[in-house]
Image (cartoon, coloured by chain):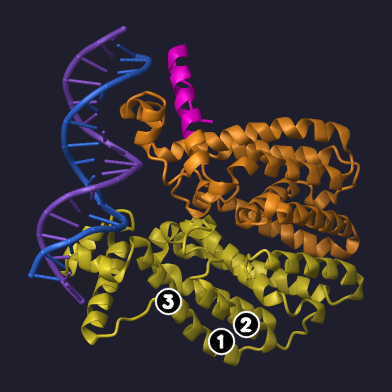
Chain colours: A orange, B yellow, C blue, D purple
DNA sequence: GTCTATAACCGGATAGAC
DNA sequence: GTCTATCCGGTTATAGAC
């Protein structure tokens, strides 16, 4: 995670205090309006101390990613134990993802705006995001592997990464969703999961052999370029 | 374009001067390292004057979008006049797009990092981007309409927007492309255009009627939510 | 070596005089 | 429409305390 805990218990406590305070203030007044000075003051440490633990304001966001990711992993476990249809597994995990980030919807825009910036340590394809990305892709592999629905073997290797990209798309839509309770996002999850499962089932037909093969080559090319690699 | 040129010729000149200087400095030393003070100093106006024309540093980027977009429209005209196969038309326009933005590859990251931020006036789905977006989607409509390749009628309405999204994906890959001359991006354009055309042709089969219908509903849902609407 | 605190620095943005 | 002066907040330097 590269967010190395400090060496002493005291440091750990201070670190957690700063992070909790920051996330709370982000929720209360948004990211931009929360100054580092306010975070430090609000939890009774000096500005320099906050920077000792978090080298930049952005790093506080990374901690947020890690935190909600852990929530997702926990929420997913019972789902993957109980369900065995692909549709229920995939839909369950996606709904769980939205559930974990829902409290932060008000300032989600800022949290995810680095998504397009390869220079930022926070964008989903970056080195720093690698552990979380790997785990999430692994989660989608589990979604597939534990499912009773037969998967086209030619696509089995790539599918987890594709589903991860798909889940990024859902998050993008959630960011823009203004319906109460983000109903629309949940609706879109249901609809698109249905469609996705239908497509996956179709792709098993030998009719699609050439198209699937071409897709695989394309995905392999993209991987070589470093994206999602 | 909402980048209203000012009423007086003098203002016009100053405005253009600031913009040209800014883009030049962005090219020379990158976006982050170009300070507004440097832009102002470098073209002999006061800092406040630069801000009189561009209310924020970000707005200079918007001017860049508009400029390269105009380049694309011009480059596309001869292509669409000469080619009539879908593959040649789509591929030609996408290669032209990359050509127009290629000089800015070094700082492309920054230019496009707002892609995920709904709060920014610059992200592709925003109100301010609407004119450019509408024109670009129109360009893709022309790509389809003037093509000799038959298009599944059920998808004809949505296809331009889908192609526009696909072109955003290509740009995302280009941003991350480190191969000399961005060879990989051009290769991926060729490969993915081939695949896309093949998929479009397949979707004409009545076999796909239910899937296509479901896709249409899904896209309509997303439109209603405001994304790409 | 681990942590805290204070005082700058730097650059984006704004106010208000002319 | 152009300027100067100033604010504001992220970030950094540094001096020391434990």
Query: Dot 3 surroundings within 10 Å: few (below 14), some, or many (20 or more)?
Result: few
First in sequence: mark 3 vs mark 2: 3
Q: Chain of mark 1?
A: B
Which residue is under mark 3?
B2
Task: Identify the magenta region.
Answer: A1-22
Q: Residue at x 47, y 30 (%)?
A: A21
Local secondary structure at mark 1: helix
Residue A8 in magenta?
A: yes
Percent x, y for residue A77? Answer: 77, 31
Local secondary structure at mark 3: loop
User: Do the residues at discs 3 and 2 belong to one chain?
Assistant: yes
**3D distance between C-alphas at marks 3 and 2:** 30 Å
User: Do the residues at discs 1 and 3 belong to one chain?
Assistant: yes
When asked about the image quadrant of residue B195, the answer is bottom right
Q: Chain of mark 2?
A: B
Mark 2–mark 1 contact, CB under 8 Å? yes
User: Do the residues at discs 2 and 1 belong to one chain?
Assistant: yes
Which residue is under mark 1?
B79
Q: Residue at x 33, y 65 (%)?
A: B55
* Number of marks present in the image shown: 3
First in sequence: mark 2 vs mark 1: 1
Q: Residue lying at the far bottom in this picture: please name it.
A: B81
Q: Residue at x 36, y 29 (%)?
A: A41
* Closer to the camera in the image, D4 or A141: D4
Which residue is under mark 2?
B89
């Amino acid at each position: 995670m590269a967010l190395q805990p400090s060496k002493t218990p005291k440091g750990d406590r201070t670190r957690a205090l700063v992070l909790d305070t920051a996330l709370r203030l982000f929720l209360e007044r948004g990211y931009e309006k929360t100054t580092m000075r306010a975070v430090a003051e609000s939890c009774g440490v000096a500005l320099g101390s906050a920077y000792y633990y978090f080298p930049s304001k952005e790093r506080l966001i990374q901690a947020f990613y890690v935190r909600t990711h852990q929530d997702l992993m926990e929420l997913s476990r019972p789902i993957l134990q109980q369900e065995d249809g692909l549709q229920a597994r995939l839909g369950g995990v996606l709904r769980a993802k939205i559930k974990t980030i829902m409290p932060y919807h008000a300032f989600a825009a800022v949290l995810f705006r680095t998504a397009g910036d390869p220079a930022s340590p926070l964008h989903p394809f970056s080195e720093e995001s690698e552990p979380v990305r790997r785990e999430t892709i692994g989660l989608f592999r589990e979604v597939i592997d534990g499912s009773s629905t037969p998967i086209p073997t030619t696509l089995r290797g790539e599918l987890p990464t594709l589903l991860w990209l798909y889940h990024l798309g859902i998050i993008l839509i959630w960011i823009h969703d203004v319906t109460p309770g983000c109903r629309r996002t949940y609706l879109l999850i249901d609809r698109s999961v249905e469609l996705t499962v239908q497509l996956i089932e179709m792709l098993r037909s030998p009719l699609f052999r050439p198209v699937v093969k071409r897709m695989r080559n394309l995905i392999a090319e993209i991987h070589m370029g470093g994206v999602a690699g």
